Amino acid sequence: MGRQRCRLHFLKETIHIVEMIQLDDIKRMLQVQGYFTDDTVAMSVFLSMQLEKPLLVEGPAGVGKTEIAKVLAKAMDTKLIRLQCYEGLDATHALYEWNYQRQLLHLKMTEHNEQSLEEKERTIFNEAFLLKRPLLQAITQEKKPVLLIDEIDRSDEEFESFLLEVLSDWQITIPEIGTIHASKIPQVILTSNRTRELSEALQRRCLYLYIDYPDFEKEWTIVKHKTPGIDSKLAGQITRFMQELRTVKMEKKPGLSETLDWAKALASLHIDHLDRVVIEQTLGVVIKDWKDTREVQLSLGELMEKTGIIPRVDKL
Ligand SMILES: Nc1ncnc2c1ncn2[C@@H]1O[C@H](COP(=O)(O)OP(=O)(O)OP(=O)(O)O)[C@@H](O)[C@H]1O
Ligand SMILES: [Mg+2]
């Protein structure tokens, strides 16, 4: 009995270690491509790969949603196929279109030959005259690609239902050619900024990951890594300032992209520490809304105190 319990314990431990190794592998794999992440993100990516299920990534602007797909494609050494969603996007732009100009040209060039009308029709409605759009491209790759369906919340609900069909069946029917089945199921990453609720049906088909603004540790690591040569003190000040800035009530809170832009801008100006003048002159890199700019200007003294750029009045 005792031995059995021992074996069970050993098995559990082994499974735990295997999971740890795989999670660490995923983290390392993404980190090699310059994407720093925690266990939650790594686990979502890992499960999405294991279960071949799309991963729906939501979160505020500029926190690394789109970047996941980009680095994953690099890490898997495969093609990144991107479908950028927008209002009015329809199936034609996502699936395929016929290359009318080429078809016309072909008809013109062959107008005097002996082919029957049916034969000519068969010729111009085959794959050579097909313009593959992202979804068709994604299911006809020899190597499993990463399919990024970016900002799905911007598309209309009808498009979402159509997409659901493709994501369930992994096949596309072209009336003139027939049904094309996926050669490899793509690794799908969908992103959304939550400008509208997505349908429950779509959510059910996906694994879900919410990425929030980074904590100090993560943001600092990314700033240091992505801004080579930045002064350590400046990197710390920028990160602390950004963390505090996000606590101010604003229309558009700055994300990691703004932090990185700011860090790069200040590093290129050979600045090694923040002060009021530097912040005021470069605030436009971080804040992109006039009301928010006003708000931040009003609370700048307090922000600088909180981040230790100037000493607190009560400590003077
Ligand atoms: N975890 C991370 N590690 C390294 N760099 C990151 C990470 N997250 C984000 N970044 C960087 O932050 C920037 C913004 O990332 P990304 O474009 O993916 O944001 P997003 O969430 O898709 O934003 P939006 O909602 O505006 O499209 C990129 O330059 C990216 O390299
Ligand atoms: Mg994005």
Image (cartoon, rainbow, N blue to C red):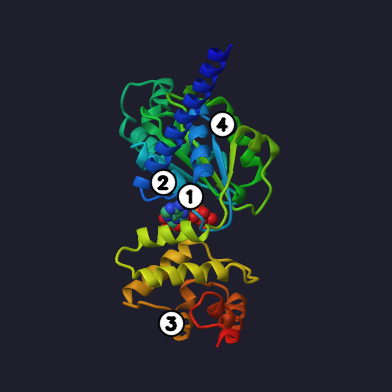
Of 246 and 111, the residue lying toward us: 246
Sequence-wise, which precedes: disc 2 or disc 3? 2
Mark 3 sits on what residue? 278
Compared to residue 227, the image places residue 271 above or below, namely below
C-alpha distance separating marks 1 and 3: 31 Å
User: What amino acid is labelled 2 in the image?
Assistant: Lys
Of 215 and 258, the residue lying toward us: 215
Label 3 Cα neighbours within 10 Å, binned few <14 / some 14-19 / many ≥20: few
Do the residues bearing badges 1 and 2 touch, measured as CB atoms within 8 Å?
yes
Of the residues tagged 4 and 3, which is closer to the observer?
Answer: 3
C-alpha distance separating marks 1 and 2: 7 Å
Of 66 and 218, the residue lying toward us: 218
Instruction: Pinpoint residue 127: horizontal percent, then vertical percent.
Output: 39, 28
Residue found 52% across the figure and 83% down from its top: 311
Mark 4 sits on what residue? 167
Do the residues bearing badges 4 and 1 touch, measured as CB atoms within 8 Å?
no
Residue at the farthest top position: 1
C-alpha distance separating marks 4 and 2: 20 Å
Per the image, label 1 sits on a secondary structure element best described as helix
Of the residues tagged 2 and 3, which is closer to the observer?
Answer: 3
Do the residues bearing badges 2 and 3 touch, measured as CB atoms within 8 Å?
no
Sequence-wise, which precedes: disc 4 or disc 1? 1
Sequence-wise, which precedes: disc 4 or disc 2? 2
In the picture, measured across the screen, residue 24 lies left or right of residue 250, that is: left
Instruction: Pinpoint residue 281: horizontal percent, then vertical percent.
Output: 45, 83
